[in-house]
Image (tube, helix red, strand yellow):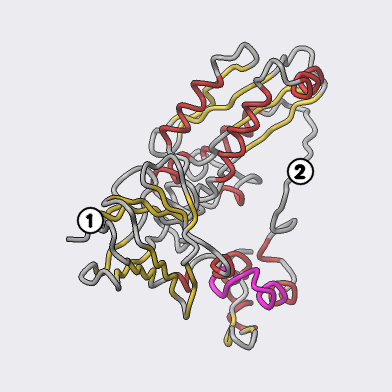
Amino acid sequence: MIKVSSQFDAGNIETISTENVRDIQLKIRKDRHSDFFQWFYFRVQNVAGQAVRMRILNAGDAAYVGGWDGYHVVASYDRKEWFRVSTTRYDQGELIIDHTPEQQSIYYAYFAPYSYEQHLDLLAAASQSDRCEILDIGTTLEGRDLNVLRIGDPTTAKYNLWVTARQHPGETMAEWFVEGMLARLLDLEDALAGQLLDDCVFWVVPNMNPDGSVLGHLRTNAAGVNLNREWQTPSLERSPEVFSVIEQIMPGEKAANMNPGGGGFGNPFERDIDRVVQDARNGLVSEKGAKMDYGVVFSDFKNLQVDAAATQALRAKHA
């Protein structure tokens, strides 16, 4: 009997039907108190040697539909080594995964997961270095620790460099990046790292959103709050993660924000509507994303027709 489950750290899936091995029907669960969803992570059992077809029925309503184009799900038998399933395709609003597992138990995920236990192991391992000090800066809404790693000597450094990862918990690749970055910064034989630490102190938050990570969220914390929209007016009630980081930044410091990518500058609900339409034309934003992130309502998304009255009313609520 086929079994699908996700009751584990970062797990996310809803099982609709497992009656037919060639038509396992699933849905991604929304972030709590939010309409965002795209991250999934689940286990399938009793399928060794069988040609399995899984259909994620609500993929067409995900936060970033354009992300399914050319996407291949990741899979693992031991949750350590992950591989891509090339026979993944997006078709008519569904993500379809065709795969013949070699073992009875296999895990599938949106990207290679980085569990909360791995996160705690990363903090513990880094703090064993004489270059690193682990600081307790706060607590999440569900009672998990918020920590920052301080690497370097703050009494001699000219610059403070902050690195934060996983404001969006579904972006697990960010914490994998931090793991590699820490390995270099803490390597006593790495000349470049030594040179950087002569002038800089690194303040590293490997996971800004522990609650969302454990809950299997794509974008939000336990309260359904998108943390990268909280930096102007964070609060302990809605976004203690951002509030706690800002409290660590020294008074009078000048901040420069550098990112490898981003959605733009300013209030997203004041963004030029024509630019949002252009993003939709280029597959960079979905109909739901345009409405939720920019307050732009389409009357006909296929033909990129904007409902001006509905857009004005929605943006007025966020003014």
Percent position of residue 164, x then y: 62, 37
Bounds of the magenta segment: 278-290
Q: Is residue 231 above or below residue 287?
A: above
Q: Is residue 162 above or below residue 5?
A: above
Q: Is residue 20 left or right of residue 30?
A: left
Quadrant that contains the C terminus:
bottom right
Percent position of residue 149, x then y: 60, 24
Please tell me how many numbered marks the rendered image carries: 2
* Badge 2 or badge 1: first in the primary sequence: 1
Q: Tag 2, which secondary structure?
A: loop
User: Could you say which is closer to the camera, residue 161 or residue 271?
Assistant: 161
Give the residue number, with chain letter if any, for mark 2. Answer: 258
Instruction: Give the residue displayed 65% in from the left and 20% down from the top.
Output: 186
Amino acid at dot 1: Asn
Percent position of residue 299, x then y: 57, 86
Give the residue number, with chain letter if any, for mark 1. Answer: 46
Alpha carbon of mark 2 to alpha carbon of mark 1: how far? 47 Å
User: Could you say which is closer to the camera, residue 313 or residue 50?
Assistant: 50
Q: Tag 1, which secondary structure?
A: loop
Instruction: Give the residue displayed 54% in from the left and 64% down from the top.
Output: 71
Percent position of residue 232, x then y: 66, 46
Q: Is residue 73 above or below residue 299?
A: above
Instruction: Give the residue displayed 28% in from the left and 63% down from the top.
Output: 50
Look at the image and say whether residue 214 sits in the magenta stretch: no
Q: Is residue 165 left or right of residue 201?
A: left
